[in-house]
Amino acid sequence: MNDNRLIVSLPDKGLADALGVDTSQVDLIEWDMTGPPPLDSIDIVVPPYMGARECLTNLEGLHVRLVQGLTAGYDGVAEALPANMVFANAASVHETSTSEMTLALILASQRGIPDFVRAAEKGHWARAWHESLADRTVLLVGYGGVGKAIETRLLAFEVTVVRVARTQRSDDTGIIHAIGELPLLLAQADIVVVVVPLTDETTHLVDDAFLSTMRDGTLLVNVSRGSVADTNALLAHAQTGRLRLALDVTDPEPLPEGHPLFALDNVLISPHVGGATSAALPRIARLLRNQIARLLNDEEPLNVVLRT
C-alpha cells in the first residue's frame, strides 16, 4: 500500500459528511471550483453536481490524479478539461433513480395521471379508460447501465422489451439490435424510451424522420439529454396530437417559461430530475470511498471515460 495520504477536494460539506472516510489516510478539503485551487496538488477532485463543465477550466496547472464527476453523462467534458487529466463518470450512482423516473413517466402517461390531476384541481371527477403498460412493446434506444436498469423494472410489468445499442450483439436473453435497425423497430413500438449518451452521432437522433416512423399514439420518453431530440420536431408531432411525449430533459434547458410544449396535454415534462433523489448522496459516497481505496492501493480508478 502507498503510505502517502490522499488529498480529496469536495464541492460541499454535505458530501464530506456523507463520505465518512478514515481521516488518518485522507485529507478532505472543500472547494466548489468557482475560484482558483487551494493547493498545487490534489489527488481526487470532485466537481459540483450542477455546472461542473463550466468550472473544469479552473483545474489548469493543478496536479490531479483523478477528476471524479457526479453524473453519468460527460458530454462537453473533453472540451473543457485541461491536458493531462483523468476523468471518471458516476456510473453505478444514478441508474436506479433514473430508471425509477422513467417508469414514473411511462406509468403516469399511460394511465392518464396528468389528466386526473388537472381535473382534480378543478374539482372534477374525471373517470376514464387509458392505455395499460402491460402487453405493450417498449423500444429501449440505448442499452448502457441506465437502459439495463430500466429493462429490469419494465419486465415486471409484463411488457415486451426490444433493445437497441450502437452495434448488434446478443446476451443471455436474446438479441440487442443495432441502431441502424431503428426505422423498422420504431414502427413496431408502443413506447419508445431514449437513453443514449449525447455524442455527435446522437445529437438530434430523434428528428422528424425518427418521429414520423413512430405509429400514431406512441409514447416517446427522453431521459438522456435534451439535445438528443430536435425540439422543433417534437413540438410539431405533439401539437397534432399524433404522438405523446414524456420528457425529463429538454433543449434548451431549462425550457423557457411559456414554451408551447408546456401547454400540451399530451406532453409530460419533469425538470431533469431523473437522478435527484435521496439515493444519490449515499451512492456517490460509496463510489468515492471505492475510488479512494483504489488510489491508496495504487490501483486504477473505476469508471474512467476520458484521459486528456
Image (tube, rainbow, N blue to C red):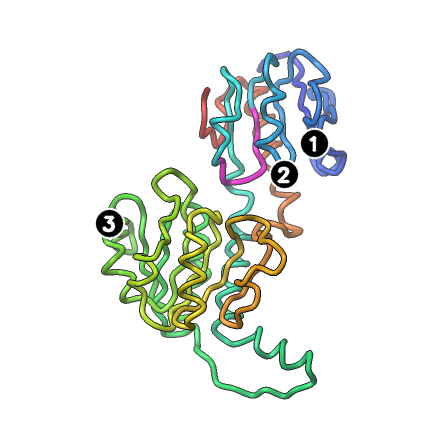
The amino acid type, in three-letter code, at marker 2 is: Tyr
Circles 3 and 2, Cβ within 8 Å, touching? The answer is no
Give the secondary structure at mark 2: loop
The amino acid type, in three-letter code, at marker 3 is: Gly
For the stretch drawn in magenta, the main secondary structure is loop
Sequence-wise first label, 2 or 1: 1
**Residue range corresponding to the magenta coloring:** 67-74
Residue 305: x, y in percent?
A: 45, 30
**Label 2 crowding class (10 Å Cα cut-off): few <14, some 14-19, many 20+?**
few
Q: Which quadrant holds the N terminus?
A: top right
| Number of marks in picture | 3
Name the residue located 57 percent from the left edge and 64 percent from the top edge. Answer: 262
- Compared across the picture, whether 211 is left or right of 43 comes to left
- Compared across the picture, whether 171 is left or right of 149 comes to left
Magenta span contains residue 69: yes
| Eye-nearest disc, 3 or 1 | 3
Residue 18: x, y in percent?
A: 72, 38
Give the secondary structure at mark 1: loop
Q: Which mark is residue 49?
A: 2
Circles 2 and 1, Cβ within 8 Å, touching? The answer is yes
Foreground residue among 16 and 250:
250
Rendered position, 62 above or below 216: above
Q: Which mark is residue 11?
A: 1
Foreground residue among 202 and 111:
202
Q: Quadrant of residue 203?
A: top left
Name the residue located 45 percent from the left edge and 26 percent from the top edge. Answer: 306
